[in-house]
Image (cartoon, grey):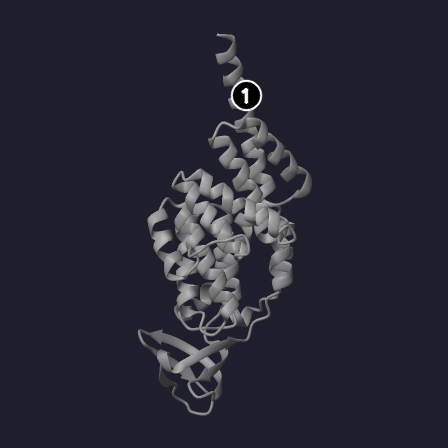
Amino acid sequence: MKKGFLYFLIVAIGFTSSIQAAPLNVELIMSGGRAWKGQLIKRDGDWIEFSTGVSARPIRLGASTIERINYSVKLNLEHLLQLKEDREFDSLISNLNQMLAPFKDYQDIPSNLMRYRALLMELYFLTEEYDQALAYASQLASDGGDDVALVENARTYQALSLIQSGRSDDAQVLMNQLGWLGDLREDSNPKQLYLGAKLMSVKEEYSQAMELIAYVIAFNSQDTEWMQPAELLCAEIYMKLGMLDSAEEVIRQISLLYPNTAEYDASLILQDKLVELRAIEAIETDS
């Protein structure tokens, strides 16, 4: 990674030196809706020391009485997402962790930084650090409060991380609790169809998995969020079943339709495996 890129990243995110050092300038939204502006001094277990600037001594607040913390930070989420699009995952993870470090003691309290923790969750998943992704997903699902979209996304990554880390039984329990596996049909939510197919694939129930994938592809062609991984999963299952011609065709479609995506990267790996299997097949045919 070039030094110029790292400098550009730090400048673009817009952190100031005052944010990186304690105390932290914040607005606290308390139970009942009352707002207090001041500084977080330190965390002491279930208690937080907070200075309003009026009194010489800080006051102690129960962490459970704080509904939300709004930090005085300026983070360029749009630029961060662009860096994600450019696939600079490892450097982005490192810099995000460094920049969010001053707020770690308060991360269990809902705040305006939760979207960036959600980004870290996704990045850890994309880099196959599933334990880290699961840790962030579990915490966000628990602490997301009334942010329905954030909690839903966190639960999705909980399920995906459990499946990918080999904990399919735990994933099935979670998905049943959330009602995501009940009565899956062609008109079901494409996310639930995909997760169900992913789970069935891990359990080697390939016919059921392919049926659910077919529903995603046939009835949700405009939903690229789930269409793309569904096509990749389709290719993976074809490979496992030894249907190499079918796998090759799906891989070709992915390479044409979804360049510069996680699915494209995974399809290249599948293509290499396909070449190896073709070579083995040719040797066995000749012998």
Quadrant including the N terminus: top right
Q: Between residues 32 and 104, which one lies in front from this camera angle?
A: 32
Tell me how many marks there are: 1
Residue 94 in sight from this viewpoint: no
Quadrant for residue 137, please give it: bottom left
Does the image show residue 119? yes
Density class for disc 1 (Cα within 10 Å; few <14, some 14-19, many ≥20) is: some
Residue for point 48% across, 63% down: 152
- The percent position of residue 47, horizontal first and vertical second, equals 33, 79
Counting from the top left corner in percent of width and height, residue 229 is at 55, 46
Q: Amino acid at mark 1?
A: Arg
Q: Farthest left residue?
A: 45
Residue 282 lies left or right of residue 258; in this view the side is left
Closest to the observer, 57 or 80: 80
x, y percent for residue 172: 37, 52
Q: Is the residue 253 above or below the residue 72 in the image?
A: above
Tag 1 secondary structure: helix
Q: Measuring 50% from the left and 31% from the top, which residue is drawn there?
A: 239
Coordinates of residue 195 in the picture (x, y in percent): 47, 51
Q: Horizontally, is 109 left or right of 212 in the view? A: left
Please name whichever residue, 235 or 165, is drawn nearer the observer in this view of the structure: 235
Q: Which residue ends up furthest to the bottom in the rendered image?
A: 54
Q: Which residue is painted at 41% across and 78% down in the image?
A: 41
Residue labelled with disc 1: 278
